[in-house]
Image (cartoon, rainbow, N blue to C red):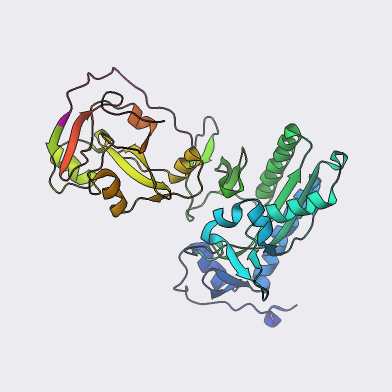
Amino acid sequence: MRVSQSLIPTMRQDPGEAEVVSHRLMLRAGMIRKVAAGIYSYLPLGLRVIRKIETIVREEMNRIGAQELLLPILSSAELWKETDRWDFYGKELFRLHDRHERDFCLGPTHEEVVTDLFRREVSSYRQLPVTLYQIQTKFRDEIRPRFGIMRGREFIMKDAYSFDQDVEGAKRTYQDMYDAYCRIFARMGLEFRPVEADTGLIGGISSHEFMVLANTGEELIVFDPDTQYAANVERAEIAPPTIGEPETPLPLEKVSTPNAKSVEEVCALLNVPPSRLVKTLLYQTGTDEITAVLIRGDHQANEIKIQRHLGIHELSLATPEMVLRFTTAPVGFVGPIGLQKIRILADQAVAALRNFIVGGNEPDVHLIHVNIDRDFAIESI
């Protein structure tokens, strides 16, 4: 077909809605057009690119013996309730009901559907192993769609599911899939890193994400060029801090810190670095249950790791009202000493500290020269 006959509506100027260069170029080149927040139409040029990517993916999936199928986009709520993910998946799951008031969802992933199919159709271990895959449109109700098609509510995904006779067989299949993904990204000429990742709502004992290195994006990874260790920040394992000569525990003291609620304000008032301050973060981990998490003043809490440690699917900071009810102290002055019926978790960097500073559990008060075990106990590190 002649170019003059093709639908390629290019744009002269950068569109104001585009936040990143990939989004801007795809719009200007006439590859995509926005329908609504997080929803895009692929125009002929963009669809040609998608089809070429799909061809590479299919070739590598077929190479490892995976079989392609196509599962329905619409899933029955019964299957999701059977695995307890109907509620656990949260607000990202598009839910709807038909004219008979039966519940359904638009599939963000297809573990439930493919497992139900497999258990109905496969009756003997002699039929294993089997790996099934599909290339299909998925739906997730993203809270803030952005970056064009990088974070959309509707997107195209290749998902594969393997069924093996035993754990060793599953590990071999996992390695085959890992190698296939490496070949896919290499054939596309992309600079990438396979990184250890959290298994999330899907679960499992191991997970890798293949990250393309770029100046734009929303994921951060850690990478050691010497050991080739790579992980996203949610999964990265941090070595315990080096502990030098132990400090002599000093007597616990109460100090006045009027209106000093933030780390910066407390450090300025007491003339100490943030690393000497320990923040006590209170999280709601149940209907009426609070967990205290201790981290250094110069660190941030990794809520994914906290969820994984506690074995829960949802986590939220306690409201100021809950903080006051459980501790009798306003936000900014909460500390671990004297907390009742609240489990206390401490980051390993906190466990290595001596003579640190915490909130005093009363307004305008902090405690200095605090030490674990002597002044309070922790449940785990």
Predominant SS of the magenta segment = loop
- Does 305 sit above or below residue 68? above
**Count of labels shown?**
0
Quadrant of the snapshot with the N terminus: bottom right
**Magenta-drawn stretch contains 252:** yes
Res. 27 visible in picture:
yes
Task: Return the x and y of residue 339 as percentages of the image width and height.
Answer: 29, 37
Is 122 placed left or right of 28 in the picture? right
* Residue at image location 72% in from the left, 50% down from the top: 160
Is 354 placed left or right of 188 in the picture? left
Frontmost residue, 93 versus 49? 93
Res. 56 visible in picture:
no
Bounds of the magenta segment:
233-253
* Residue at image location 86% in from the left, 45% down from the top: 123
Task: Return the x and y of residue 239 as percentages of the image width and height.
Answer: 44, 29
As drawn, the residue found furthest toward the bottom would be 5
Task: Return the x and y of residue 125 as percentages of the image width and height.
Answer: 84, 39
Is 118 placed left or right of 23 in the picture? right
- Does 330 sit above or below residue 356? below
Is 352 placed left or right of 27 in the picture? left
Frontmost residue, 375 versus 93? 375
Quadrant of the snapshot with the C terminus: top left
* Residue at image location 49% in from the left, 55% down from the top: 217
Task: Return the x and y of residue 349 as percentages of the image width and height.
Answer: 36, 31
Frontmost residue, 306 versus 41? 306
**Magenta-drawn stretch contains 168:** no
* Residue at image location 64% in from the left, 65% down from the top: 106
